[in-house]
Every structure is written in C-alpha cells, then in structure tokens.
C-alpha cells in the first residue's frame, strides 16, 4: 500500500476549469464587473504558463457560455471586446511559448471580427504542441451534443453512416472536443458546486474539485495544490480495485 502522503497515480494530463468569480472579485473592491474579467484574463496567462511544470498537457477553460448572453448588454459587449483584445495581445506570446490554441462552441452568434481572430490564432499556433489550450466560447454542453446529433443525423440521411454503427465513440467524433482526450480533472472556482453545462459528456469519469478561491485569485500555487490533491484520489472508472 502506498503511504498516505504519496500520490496514487500521476497528475492530470487534461484539466478543465470553470473560471468563476470575476464579477464578485471586482464588486468586493468596489469596481465594475468588467474590471474583474480583465483580472481574470491576466490569470489565464499565468495558469497556461504553469501547465508544463505541472505536467498538464491540455487545459480547457470556460470563457463564455451559451447562457451568458442573458447578462446585461454592457457586460456582454465588454466581454466580447476583452476576447478580441486578449487574442490580439497574447497571440505572439502563445506562439512563442509553444501553446496550441483552439476554440469550442457555436460561433454563429459571435461577431465576424472575433471569429476571424479566433480562426487566425488557431492557424497561427497549429504546429505547437507544448500545451493545448482550448477556450470554450459561446459553449454549452447540451448545445454541443445537440449540434453533434444533428450532424450525425445528416450523415445517416445521406447514407454515409448506418444507424447501427452509432455508439458512444461515434458520437464523440462529432463533438466540438473530438481532438481532445477527456478531462481528468474539472476545477470550479468561487465556491459554487455546479458544473453549469460544461463538458457534460466528456467529464463522465473526471474528478471534480470545487474551491472557494475566486478566479482572479487562482494563482499558480493554488493550481499546484489542487493538482497535488488529485494525485491522492483513487480512480476506479466503475471498477472495483482490490
């Protein structure tokens, strides 16, 4: 039996993060919510850079959900401007640091300039392999599965696929995340214990960590501590381990 302070297995290779708490962080400081979102964007940079030292190959972050359109017009417009600014400012640094960036989610509601910037960043970093950063933008897991099922139905209607061939693996190939391994660990910051329609299919066997820290305060040291805790969990994947 391993000692209690020794990890049972290696750390997670794919970490997904629900970055919650930007607005509350700003409000605690008497500042507008967008001030918190800008602080949160800076925190993303730190965590991405920490991934190689922590053995994390894939990082997937929840930037904007299909439900976030319900927020005030001012906040939504500010977030879209922040996404454009983030891509423009970080593109060359991400390229130089070996980060491959890809986006998941439905782009149909996003403005043309933002979509163009997303496309260009994906192309610019397409040969990188040090860290795979996936940004979920206008993403919702139910929406993703619905769109995947629609594409799958078209394949069947047009005779390229038989309904008898449809299984979980087949459906996974039509998801936005078809290029990613399933997450090993999902972290949600800010003390909320919800998964908020994030990677529902992919996280079937992921470990979850809900922490009180607000996202702008989620430093690389907090990240390392959470990852260390993951290594001490016993992962069974439905089986019984003797």
Image: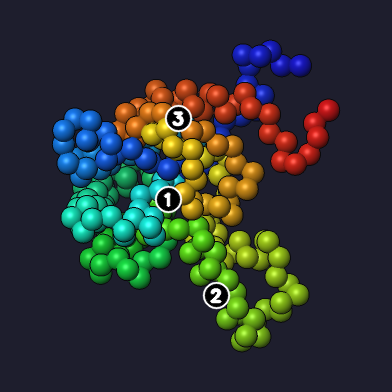
- Label 2: which secondary element: helix
Q: Nearer the viewer, residue 143 or 229?
A: 143
Circles 2 and 1: CB distance less than 8 Å? no
Residue 129 visible in the snapshot: no
Residue at 17 percent across and 41 percent down: it is 32
SS for dot 1:
strand
Q: Nearer the viewer, mark 1 or mark 3?
A: 3
The residue singled out by tag 3 in the image is 211
Q: From the viewer's perspective, is 130 left or right of 206?
A: left
> For the N terminus, which image quadrant?
top right
Residue 14 rendering spot, x and y as whole percentages? 53, 41
Residue 47's x, y, as percent?
37, 34
Residue 44 visible within the image = yes
> Could you say which quadrant of the image residue 224 lies in?
top left
Crowd tier of the residue under label 1, counting other residues whose Cα lies within 10 Å: few below 14, some 14–19, many 20 or above: many
Residue 53, position as x, y percentages in the image: 45, 28
Q: Which residue is mark 2?
A: 150
Label 3 or label 2, whichever lies nearer to me, is: 3
Q: Which residue is mark 1?
A: 134
Q: Between residue 85 and residue 101, name the one nearer to us.
A: 85
Q: Quadrant of residue 113?
A: bottom left
Label 2 and label 1: CA atoms lie apart by 23 Å
Tag nearer the camera, 2 or 1: 2
Q: Earlier in the sequence, mark 3 or mark 2?
A: 2
């Amino acid at each position: 039996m391993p000692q209690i302070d020794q990890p049972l297995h290696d750390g997670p290779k794919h970490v997904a993060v629900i970055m919650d708490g930007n607005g509350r962080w700003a409000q605690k400081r008497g500042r507008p919510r967008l001030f918190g979102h800008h602080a949160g964007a800076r925190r993303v940079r730190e965590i991405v850079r920490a991934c190689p030292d922590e053995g994390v190959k894939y990082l997937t972050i929840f930037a904007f959900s299909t439900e976030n359109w319900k927020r005030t017009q001012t906040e939504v417009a500010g977030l879209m401007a922040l996404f454009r600014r983030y891509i423009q400012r970080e593109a060359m640094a991400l390229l130089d640091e070996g980060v491959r960036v890809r986006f998941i989610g439905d782009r149909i509601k996003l403005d043309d300039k933002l979509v163009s910037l997303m496309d260009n960043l994906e192309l610019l970093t397409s040969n990188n392999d040090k860290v795979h950063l996936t940004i979920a933008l206008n993403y919702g897991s139910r929406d993703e599965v619905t769109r995947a099922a629609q594409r799958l139905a078209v394949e069947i209607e047009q005779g390229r696929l038989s309904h008898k061939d449809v299984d979980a693996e087949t459906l996974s190939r039509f998801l936005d995340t078809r290029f990613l391994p399933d997450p090993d660990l999902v972290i949600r910051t800010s003390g909320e214990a919800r998964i908020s329609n994030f990677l529902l299919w992919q996280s079937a066997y992921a470990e979850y960590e809900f922490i009180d820290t607000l996202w702008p305060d989620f430093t690389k040291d907090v990240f390392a501590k959470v990852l260390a805790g993951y290594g001490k969990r016993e992962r069974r994947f439905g089986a019984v381990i003797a």
